[in-house]
Amino acid sequence: MRIQVAVTAADGMHSAFMRTRATYLMVLLLAMQVTGYHAQPPEAEIATTEEAAQVIPMRLAAQMDSLGIAAKDIQFVVDKSERRFDVIAGDRVLRTYPCVLGEVPEGDKMMQGDRKTPEGVFGIRSKRLHAKWHAFVWVDYPNAESRRRFAERKRNGTIPATADIGGEIGIHGVPEGMDHWIDMGADWTWGCIALKNPDLDEIFPYIQAGGTTITIVP
């Protein structure tokens, strides 16, 4: 690209100023051409962000529609050692998301305060949006098997006789803008399973209290 600049000056000082300004404009325009820089209005950037946010929750929905899978057919499997949250239907894995666990990730939850994520097969009690954690899906812990293990551990002295079994275990998101907490892979919850907010948004509409199950394996 050629750039032609006409400079007319009444005196030497004005002429020097115009030459300097012309040189600056030439450098700027050439840099813009090389880098592909283009100005984009803020409205366009916002629209792009909103469009992306709408597309993400549709991915699982579109996949379920194409395969004829109903909400009642999906279940969850959490692999603690891999920090992996799978959405499955039958023997088909529909989606896999990264997740993080309780601060003490290894081993089954034994009692309140141990900050472990429980292992086993659990139902879902309820789900709701959450002011801090984006959404909260209440997992059915402790269930009958959890109580059986808890009682056995008390009998054999693995845990104190005064221990409480605990509760309020769930699947939840992160504060807005903190999805990188999941990418870091560091376990920080008190026993819950944490997902990125867009990933939680994908599965949230299909979670059925009393129907969806979550299997948590070591």
Image (cartoon, helix red, strand yellow):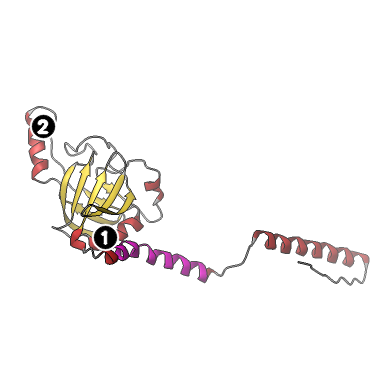
Does residue 177 belong to the magenta stretch?
no
Q: Disc 2 or 1, which lies upstream in sequence?
A: 2
Magenta span: predominant SS is helix
Q: Residue at 31% across / 60% down in the picture?
A: 201
Which amino acid type is marked by label 2?
A: Arg
Q: In which quadrant of the rendered view does residue 128 lie?
A: bottom left
Left or right: where 27 falls relative to 38: right
Q: Is residue 19 visible?
A: yes
Residue contact at pointers 2 and 1, CB within 8 angstroms: no
Vertical comparison of 58 with 149: above or below: below
Q: Quarter holding the N terminus? A: bottom right
Nearest-to-viewer mark from 2 and 1: 1
Residue located beneath label 2 in the image: 153
Which amino acid type is marked by label 1?
A: Phe
Vertical comparison of 50 with 133: above or below: below
Between 116 and 212, the one lying in front of the other is: 212
Does residue 48 belong to the magenta stretch?
yes
Q: Position of residue 11 (x, y in %)?
A: 93, 68
Residue located beneath label 1 in the image: 204
Q: Is residue 131 visible?
A: no
Q: Residue at 34% across / 65% down in the picture?
A: 58
